[in-house]
Image: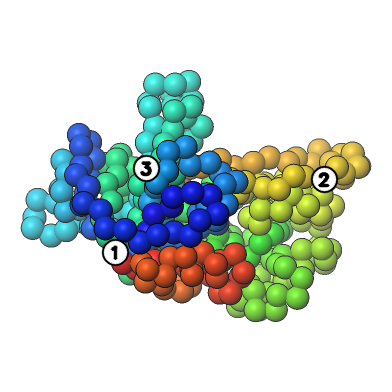
Amino acid sequence: MVFEAVGAPLRAVELPVPQPGPGQLLLRVHACGVCRTDLHLLDGEVEIAEPPRILGHQIVGSVIAGEEEATDGQARRVGVPWLGWTCGECVYCRSGRENLCIRARFTGRDIDGGMAEYAVADARYCFPLPSEYPDEQAAPLLCAGLIGYRALGMCGEARRLGLYGFGAAAHILTQVARSQGREVYAFTRAGDEAAQGFAMELGAVWAGGSEEAPPEELDAAIIFAPAGALVPLALRALAPGGTVVCGGIHMSDIPSFPYSSLWEERTVRSVANLTRRDAREMLALAPRVPVRTKVSAYGLDEAGTALDDLRSGRFTGAAVIVP
């Protein structure tokens, strides 16, 4: 399913099976998670410099060719995340911050992604997946799970954690946070009783609309919804010393707010991409929690429908494309 231009629907095309180059693996795709970043790419809010491009950056697949092909006759299953290549040479790569690599390439934006039957990926950014997870349930861990995990790390030891936008990332992160003894406060679109009920089922201690004040001051908040207007709301919900983490790659403009909302050592920061360390740690942690992902499956030719359903909030949990 190919992206050709901003605002145009994805188009089904027949392409040759890609061939892996040095350091790459050829994967037969079993599942590919759908992410809000795919919507940002489709809408031109995050630029694809050289279309056409195959979208999709939460790839679960088996290795069928490449320098690390399984040698025991069994296809090895791996996952491929958003960060697809780094230079290893810039100041960020050399200081353990490869998520900020100045020449980074991203799966489904700069590299053809997983909304296809086959994909090629850098072997360095292919990760063994926990055997406990079927393909469809593993896919959301590769972006929703990894970005959520990195964002949670920026919250320190916060006990009362607010999650704004209760989609794929929040439903995974709620389970991780609860396993660590944190209290989760879920914020959804006003009147979204389905999402609020889902959050409570997963262990949130409170769920309400994004403009509501939680019953307790928050020690930290993570904003997954791409709405800048949520930043002042989250700041007002924080206790002194608290942190707001903006967890998306794109967000609408943040409106002005009084300095009093930021005072008392409150902090606003963003999370960008992920590192290989994040991937290894989260994929090891998920089965110990254990994280259970709720997914809605779509066929490859239904990728456009899946994106429309994500935009409209027609499902809880995550959407997954199954070729």
- The percent position of residue 322, horizontal first and vertical second, equals 34, 68
Q: Quadrant of the N terminus?
A: bottom left
- The percent position of residue 82, horizontal first and vertical second, equals 44, 47
Q: Is residue 5 left or right of residue 196?
A: left
Q: Amino acid at mark 2?
A: Pro
The residue where tag 3 is placed is: 111
Q: Residues within 10 Å of mark 2 (few under 14, many from 20)?
A: few
Q: Is residue 272 left or right of residue 302?
A: right
Image point (47%, 53%), residue name: 143
Per the model, the C-alpha gap separating discs 1 and 3 is 18 Å
Q: Residues within 10 Å of mark 1 (few under 14, many from 20)?
A: many
- The percent position of residue 205, horizontal first and vertical second, equals 70, 71
Residue 218 in sight in this render: yes
Marks 2 and 3: which is nearer the front?
A: 3
Q: Amino acid at mark 3?
A: Ile
Q: Residues within 10 Å of mark 3 (few under 14, many from 20)?
A: many
Q: Quadrant of the C terminus?
A: bottom left
N-terminal-most mark, 1 or 2: 1
Image point (31%, 58%), residue name: 13
Q: Which circle marks residue 30 in the picture?
A: 1
92, 5: nearer the viewer: 5
Dot 1 and dot 3 residues touching (CB under 8 Å): no
Per the model, the C-alpha gap separating discs 1 and 2 is 42 Å
308, 313: nearer the viewer: 308
Q: Amino acid at mark 1?
A: His
Say which quarter of the image contains residue 263. top right
The residue where tag 2 is placed is: 255
N-terminal-most mark, 1 or 3: 1
118, 287: nearer the viewer: 118
In what element is the residue under mark 3?
loop
In what element is the residue under mark 1?
strand
